[in-house]
Image: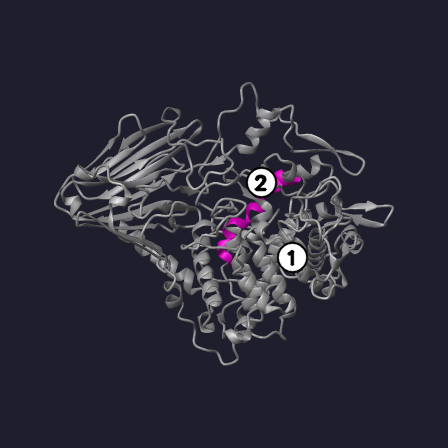
Amino acid sequence: MRPSLALANLSLVPYLFSNTGEARISPKSPPSIDRAGVVSRFNPCRNASSKSTPMQVGNGDFAFGADITGLQTFLPYGILSSWGWHNSSLPANSTPSDFTGLDWWTHDRLVNYDMPNPAEPDISQWLIANPHRINLGRIGLVFGGDYSNYTEEDLQNKTQKLDIYRGFLQSNFTIDGHLITITTSVDPESDTIAVRLNSELLALGRLGVFLDYPYATDENKFEAPFVGDWTAVSNHTTVLHHAGNENQAQVQHTLDNTTYYTTLQWRGSNVSISRVPDSHRYVLQPNGDHTREFELTATFSPREGFQSSSLSFDAIIARSQQWWTGYWETGAFVDLMGAGNATADEIQRRVILSQYLLAVNEAGHDPPQESGLVNNGWYGKFHMEMYLWHSAHWTPWGKLPLLERSIGVYNRFLPSSTQRAADQGYSGLRWGKMSDPSGRSAPGEINALLIWQQPHVFYFAETEYQSARHAGRNMEDVLAKWDYVLTESAEFMASYAFWNTSTNVYDLGPPMYPVSENTPPNSTRNPTFELAYWHFGLDVAISWKARRGQQAPQAWTHVKDNLAPLPIVYAVNETTGEKVLTYTLYEGIPSMWTDPDTVTDHPALTGIYGLLPPTAAVNQTLVSATAAQVASDWNFTTCWGWDFPMLAMNAARLGDVDAAVQYLVHPNFEFDDVGMPVGTKAPTPYFPGSSALLLAVAMMAGGWDAATNGSQQDFAPGFPAKWNVRAEGFGQML
């Protein structure tokens, strides 16, 4: 029987690296940080809507994006979820089984890969774009009477504040002197939005709420900043169902074979609900019963029947505040405000807002997509190679239960991953790339040939093992939990490595794509990061068996000990003019440091000493020379958000703390006013930048070398000593 990676009934109780972590924080045991004060200092405020990013409330599986009104009155920001997916109609006279992929020569044998087949363009594209994530709807204000055509520009005295410590959004504005106050929150335990309106316009019957629904389309790989087609009214249906009481109704929304339900519940009498003709818009209208207040909850669910609980607005607000204060007050925390400089202040702002946004967008039961629950990228699918960057930060920040929500994906994807490896002639299991919740990986040349997602399971497992060891948890439970997944992953990694009879080493590739995805696949062999990661993964696999009193398969050790050496190349040192040896992207790459097409995209070769702990294959002198060459020659305008935290981790482990903090505020690594990481090569937000930031800061604050307890490290070794960093609850990174 395979142990499950998912734990049942987890509450937000921190797994701290308590014993050694507490001892290392400070020998004088300073008073705990005023977390509420630090967090509240960075509450986002706006006086106008942003055209690119919303204010958000959510619970990790479900999120609501708001404009300046606290709803979606003027801008159709998303209501996105983990479960809301849609398949468009199949191409005529075709089924998914018609897709055959392509055969590529792989070490003297033909291997069939899930790549788009030019002879099957329609079904190939359908499989890429389906299923796609849907926008569940839109909720906004209806202005009556003379205000019916008002725009945002007609509102006066607009102010909006997101209370991230307590988890609710407060929005205020006036119309002709009439104050409107709106409070918005999301229940932490259900897909429910709670809204309270307060205005004398309610008593006058001149203010209501609408609910609207878009169609879902597979036409766009990216849907940002808004998701859905609001013009295709005839392509889908909605039906209004009245409940047995006057304060509840439900809308059933059907898009082809996808159906879900919105249960509306409100407080107050004399409220009508009606449909706007020739649309999917419904209006809730309080009809002037002399009350200034209207409360509404909207629960979205794929299940038929009235799903809304009996919770009132006040109850949901109370639950939200309890969850969010618990979130902030448990686990690790860092306070950089004592540094007294703009760089530290900006890093602190980014850290706090990232902690909020990642709990809203990336703490769900599936790995997150790149834009979380804000909008859609890559059709809303998630990428298994990015799961590490999205979610590895939860453990060192003492919030393992939030990682536990989604880590079961590795158990869930065992059948599809085992089949993938077998179909390609390998042992074990091969993890996919661009995936939907079923485990199907979308066809694509890069999708089929990427390999750096394979060792992620070892990183997650070893991080949990070290945290559990320091926290005094039952180690056998952790070892058993991960054993099957690690065993089968190692089987694939050993099987994938190819014995080169000319060089007497094991090669990785070709064909393959490295992290940067920008090299010729049929000549890309032995990329530096992937080789180091293969070493790391097989090291952990062998150690895992030893911890269980078992002997690892001899093939694992033989492959690990005989992998090709990390490739090196000469570079010219910019300062001295001397030739120095550095690592290179992959073996045999021409003109590594002088070709502008080479020094672009992800500088993954720095990840071998920073993100990854050093292995026997890594030479620190070469690592240092490589870091210097990257700093002088890399085209950082082509980088993605997570590259800069990766560079910071590399600099920190090398002891260059000034470079580490500067990478975290690099001009090409931007965050907007509400903390959304600005997209450069993909639309905003690009959340791997946020989660990688938290991973880097955890390392810089808590240190590394967890396996040896890092006992010789200074406190917060990745930050300048003069910053007077205060930190608590961090565990050491690997």
Residue 278 visible:
yes
Would you name the residue on which mark 1 appears?
A: 607
Location of residue 193 in the rendering, given as x and y in whole percent from the top left corner: 33, 46
Residue 321 is inside the magenta segment: no
Mark 2 vs 1: CB contact within 8 A = no
Q: Is residue 229 left or right of residue 175?
A: right
Q: Quadrant of the C terminus?
A: bottom right
- Place residue 584 in its image quadrant: bottom right
Location of residue 628 in the rendering, given as x and y in whole percent from the top left corner: 67, 62
**Distance between mark 2 and mark 1 Cα atoms:** 22 Å
In the displayed image of the protein, which residue is found farthest to the left?
290
Would you name the residue on which mark 2 appears?
A: 434
- Give the amino acid at mark 2: Met
Query: Magenta residues, as a range?
Result: 400-419
Residue 472 visible:
no
Q: Specify how the rendered protein is coloured.
A: one colour
User: Is 561 above or below relative to 144?
Assistant: below
Residue 414 is inside the magenta segment: yes
| Figure disc tally | 2
- Give the amino acid at mark 1: Gly
Q: Name the one closer to the observer, 243 or 286.
A: 286
Local crowd size for mark 2, using a 10 Å CA cut-off: few (<14), some (14–19), many (≥20): many
Instruction: Give the mark, 2 or 1, whose residue is nearer the N terminus.
Output: 2
Secondary element under disc 2, as helix, strand or loop, is strand
